[in-house]
Each structure stands twice: as C-alpha cells, then as structure tokens.
C-alpha cells in the first residue's frame, strides 16, 4: 500500500482546505505528517513527494483512514462525476505504468462513464509502458492534432473511442546498448513535422 502514501497525502492536504473538521492526522501517521511538513518546508515538487512517501517498510497512512467520513465525502464527490453527464468532447490520456494515476482505475472509470453516457464524446488513449509525464510526449502529436481539430470546429463522432498505443518494436527492443553494425535504431515520431 506504500505506493498510495503520496497520492493519499496529496488528497488529505486538499481536504484540509475544504472540510473544516478534517486534519491531516485523521489520515496520516506522525511520520506521514513529519514527511508532509518536510516536503512543504523545502517546497518540494511531486517527484520529491513521491520519494519522501515511497518507503515500502512504512505505510504512513493510519489504519482505517479510508473508512473516515472525509474518505466517504471524497469518494462521493470524485466518483465518476456523481454519474452526471459531462460537457465533451473529452480526451483522456493514460500511461499503463503510471504510478500516480493507476491505469486499471482510469480504464474502469472511463468504461463506466461510457456505459452511463453512450453518446458521450470521449476518446481514451492508453500508451503501453509509459509513466505519468512521459504520456504527454508519447501522444504529443495526436493530442495536439485533437486539440487543433476542436479549435478548428471539427466535429467529434458521438460515442466513446478507446485506443491503445504500443511501441513499434516493443519496449525492450529499442536498441539501446546494442553494438554498432547491429540493428540499433528505433522508430521515432516526427513530432514537429520537420
């Protein structure tokens, strides 16, 4: 469960600003609070937080944190938009190796949304073997084209579209470290059209 420490700590920080009776100690252990205070005293970023909270031998969440009234409130306000229709079109990008936004959870949420709103204009793109920020680079060309088409007034076909992107030769076949003279090249997208 330690991989959730940073994510849950971030949610707890946000809850403390909207729920007047919620304190970090409702969810975090003393060590979790100490690391949260350290993160903020050094003005650390998300990667710093991920390191501070990624101790596999120490879960910094209090037992039962997820059964508190604050956890119930958060589930209610964040679960699939409360099953309300959304203003589309929407593009959802997901890396299958993203430690911050778990792919199975995103996939289940997207599919639940699409089942509830089959006419929704939603495009879901999963990129295999890609993590959190690199998903933006992996699908940069497609993302920019999709956004440009929206500004150009291009219509979006009704319904949900799900797409999976895989490396052309597989993640382990990129050729890094191979001797010259062997097949040590890999396919790269021409992002800028040059």
Image (cartoon, grey):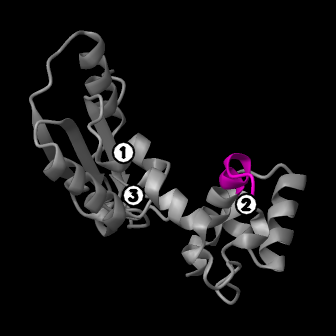
Read off the residue under disc 3: 130
Q: Position of residue 17 (x, y in %)?
A: 72, 47
- Between 132 and 172, the residue placed more toward the observer is 132
Badge 3 element: loop
Read off the residue under disc 1: 138
Q: Earlier in the sequence, mark 3 or mark 2?
A: 2
**Neighbour tally class for label 2: few under 14, some 14-19, many 20 plus, Cα within 10 Å:** some
Q: Position of residue 6 (x, y in %)?
A: 64, 65
Picture layout, residue 60 above or below residue 105:
below
Let me know if residue 120 is in the magenta part: no
Badge 2 element: loop
Q: Earlier in the sequence, mark 3 or mark 1?
A: 3
Q: Earlier in the sequence, mark 1 or mark 2?
A: 2
Alpha carbon distance from label 3 to label 1: 8 Å
Q: Are marks 3 and 1 in contact (CB under 8 Å)?
A: yes
Q: Going 17% across and 36% down the picture, which residue do you hit? A: 120
Q: Going 32% across and 43% down the picture, which residue do you hit? A: 92
The part of the chain drawn in magenta is 13-22
Let me know if residue 20 is in the magenta part: yes
Q: Which mark is residue 22?
A: 2
Q: Going 71% across and 61% down the picture, which residue do you hit? A: 49
């Amino acid at each position: 469960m330690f991989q959730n420490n940073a994510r849950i700590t971030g949610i707890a920080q946000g809850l403390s600003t909207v729920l007047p009776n919620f304190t970090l100690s409702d969810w975090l252990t003393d060590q979790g609070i100490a690391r949260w205070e350290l993160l903020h005293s050094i003005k650390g970023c998300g990667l710093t937080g991920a390191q501070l909270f990624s101790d596999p031998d120490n879960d910094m969440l209090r037992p039962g944190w997820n059964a508190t009234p604050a956890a119930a409130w958060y589930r209610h306000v964040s679960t699939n938009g409360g099953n309300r229709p959304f203003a589309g079109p929407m593009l959802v990008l997901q890396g299958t190796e993203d430690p911050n936004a778990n792919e199975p959870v995103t996939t289940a949420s997207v599919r639940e949304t699409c089942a509830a709103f089959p006419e929704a204009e939603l495009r879901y793109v999963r990129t295999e073997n890609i993590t959190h920020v690199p998903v933006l680079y992996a699908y940069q060309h497609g993302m920019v084209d999709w956004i440009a088409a929206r500004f150009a007034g291009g219509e979006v076909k009704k319904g949900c579209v799900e797409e999976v992107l895989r490396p052309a030769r597989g993640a382990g076949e990129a050729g890094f470290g191979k001797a010259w003279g062997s097949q040590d090249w890999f396919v790269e997208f021409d992002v800028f059209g040059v």
